[in-house]
Image (cartoon, grey):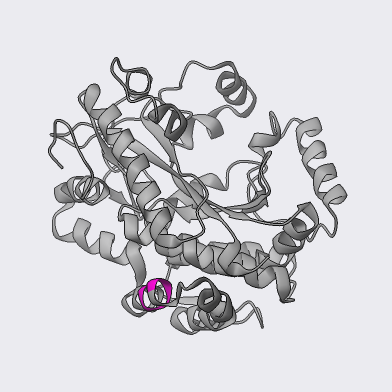
């Protein structure tokens, strides 16, 4: 399948926050069942594990500008739902302000909490998941095996959660650090075949580490019931344009890995690479996937862009993706910018995140 024909879609998890204080509020139950809710929102906005969260989805798109419109539509529906219960949206991967962790009343979530105890109760974080179309399970597994070495670089590029509960954690992606607590999260050894992949999923469920196959929280996995690869390493992006850039880059990486062999590294090395990505983002050195040696983050990002450039060109995405990604690498990335805002004026960070999240959307009460 050519890069230009591969579909891409995104899921974005976000917080509901008070419009005045920008502290998280547990109102998702009311938001997704609000009277007068647009019927289209039923497919685009859902509850997540905690009452402070909602998740938006897009249809699969072949053109990035179409994806941007679809994501804008989904965010708009989510904003309108939020405003029906006196809230607004914040696309932040960690809770910046306010207590959180009130569980949605659901048997599956209750089982997860009973089995995993404080792990489940404390992982109140949001991510962005990118689905990229593949021809078949065989191609999907080939992509999973080959792209693993580059996923820490995607994680570093997306890192945007240095602050939790008003405190600078020292990590570029504290969401990723918290997510590590799940026993099924992280990288995997190469699978080789769809049968080996499915056996791994079955083993994780049988062991009790996962309640079901939806709890197989690998950095990348085969889509559940969809002919896609689902990449799960990214922080959610407050700026919709940044989300689209990451989606385009992810699609190019999937298309490249479907056709091109890449280095294979041990899981232990991948874990180190991921740790550096979530700790430093783009402000320090990353492990070079080709050598497993430390190199300046900007150089590693440049190597990734060089690798996927043919796929970006084929899809017509070079102009959208290349300059933006190089700009992030040159300036230290999203986490550095957020940390600078928090250092100057901590109380303005949650308001800024919320403002960027809803900019350009069709609000009802807020007028955003």
Q: Give the answer, above or below, for where 152 lies relative to 202.
A: below
Q: Quadrant of residue 82?
A: top left
Give the residue at x 36% y 73%: 324
Q: Give the answer, above or below, for where 254 lies relative to 77.
A: below
Q: Is residue 350 left or right of residue 139?
A: left
Can residue 158 be seen in this snapshot?
no
Quadrant in which the N terminus appears: bottom right
Predominant SS of the magenta segment: helix
**Can you give x and y, in whole percent of width and height, for residue 101 in the image?**
41, 28
Residue 114 among those drawn in magenta: no
Give the residue at x 20% y 24%: 86
**Can you give x and y, in whole percent of width and height, for residue 130 in the image?**
53, 53
Q: Which sits in the foreground, 327 or 311?
A: 311
Span highlighted in magenta in the image:
320-324
Give the residue at x 61% y 29%: 116
Q: Which sits in the foreground, 161 or 302?
A: 302
Q: Is residue 18 left or right of residue 198?
A: left
Residue 323 among those drawn in magenta: yes
**Can you give x and y, in whole percent of width and height, for residue 85 in the image?**
24, 21
Give the residue at x 72% y 73%: 259
**Can you give x and y, in whole percent of width and height, for residue 9 in the image?**
51, 51
Quadrant in which the C terminus appears: top left
């Amino acid at each position: 399948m050519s890069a230009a024909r591969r579909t891409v879609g995104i899921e974005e998890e976000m917080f509901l926050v008070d419009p005045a204080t920008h502290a998280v509020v547990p109102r998702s139950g009311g938001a997704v069942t609000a009277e007068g809710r647009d019927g289209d929102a039923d497919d685009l906005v859902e509850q997540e594990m905690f009452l402070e969260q909602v998740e938006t989805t897009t249809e699969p798109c072949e053109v990035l500008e179409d994806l941007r419109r679809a994501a804008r539509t989904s965010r708009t529906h989510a904003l309108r739902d939020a405003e029906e219960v006196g809230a607004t949206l914040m696309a932040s991967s960690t809770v910046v302000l306010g207590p959180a962790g009130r569980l949605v009343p659901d048997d599956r979530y209750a089982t997860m909490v009973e089995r995993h105890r404080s792990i489940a109760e404390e992982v109140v974080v949001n991510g962005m998941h990118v689905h990229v179309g593949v021809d078949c399970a065989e191609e999907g597994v080939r992509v999973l095996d080959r792209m693993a070495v580059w996923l820490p670089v995607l994680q570093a590029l997306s890192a945007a959660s240095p602050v939790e509960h008003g405190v600078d954690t020292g990590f570029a992606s504290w969401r990723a650090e918290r997510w590590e607590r799940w026993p099924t999260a992280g990288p995997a050894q190469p699978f080789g075949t769809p049968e080996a992949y499915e056996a791994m999923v079955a083993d994780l469920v049988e062991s009790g580490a996962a309640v079901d196959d939806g709890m197989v929280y690998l950095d990348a996995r085969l889509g559940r019931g969809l002919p896609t690869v689902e990449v799960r390493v990214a922080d959610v992006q407050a700026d919709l344009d940044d989300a689209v850039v990451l989606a385009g880059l992810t699609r190019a990486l999937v298309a490249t890995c479907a056709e091109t062999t890449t280095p294979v590294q041990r899981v232990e090395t991948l874990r180190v690479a991921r740790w550096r990505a979530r700790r430093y983002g783009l402000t320090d050195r990353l492990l070079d996937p080709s050598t497993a040696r430390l190199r300046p983050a900007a150089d590693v990002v440049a190597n990734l862009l060089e690798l996927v450039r043919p796929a970006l060109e084929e899809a017509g995405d070079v102009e959208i993706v290349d300059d933006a990604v190089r700009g992030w690498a040159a300036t230290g990335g999203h986490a550095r910018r957020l940390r600078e805002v928090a250092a100057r004026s901590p109380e303005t960070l949650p308001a800024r995140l919320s403002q960027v999240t809803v900019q350009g959307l069709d609000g009802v009460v807020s007028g955003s």
